[in-house]
Amino acid sequence: MMHAPGPTAEACLTVLVTGGAGSENGATVMDVIEAARRETNAPISVRVEGRRPGDPAVLVANCEFARRVLGWSPKHSGLATIVQDAWRWERSRAASSGA
């Protein structure tokens, strides 16, 4: 388990929850953190801990249901593109809230 505090970590979570959730391409937490470090040019501190009981070893979302029922498919499946989009969104959200 990793803990990465701060707004850059929020962007990482956005990637994990939004971009990675329907891409059908797996990425490790460290893959996402490294991609976020590259995109943001910000240091992201992490604390690596053991997996908690019940945590799955791997999660890769299948978007077949959304594809079949809604006609939806992911526009971006590359991690770099997903992180760039998430970071752009995070910056615009912070700018509009005055943070």
Image: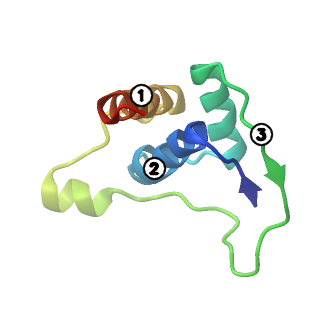
Percent across and percent down for residue 31 are 67, 38
Residue at left offset 40%, top offset 26%: 88
Residue wearing tag 2: 24
Q: How many other residues sit within 10 Å of disc 3, few (<14), some (14-19) or many (≥20)? A: some
Task: Give the distance between the C-alpha atoms of the residues marked 3 and 2, in whole angstroms.
Answer: 27 Å
Q: Quadrant of residue 70?
A: bottom left
Q: Which residue is mark 3?
A: 45
Relative height, residue 87 to residue 10 (above, below) = above
- What is the three-letter code of the residue carrying label 3? Ser
Residue at 45% x, 53% y is 17
The residue tagged 1 is 91
Look at the numbered discs 1 and 3 and tell me whether their residues touch, using CB distance below 8 Å. no
Look at the picture and state if 60 lies above or below 23: below
Residue under the image location 29 percent in, 31 percent down: 96
Q: Nearer the viewer, residue 13 or 58?
A: 13
Disc 2 residue type (three-letter): Glu
Dot 3 or dot 2: first in sequence order is 2
Q: Amino acid at mark 1?
A: Arg
Most distant residue in the left direction: 70
Residue 39 position, x and y percent, is 57, 21
Report the label total: 3
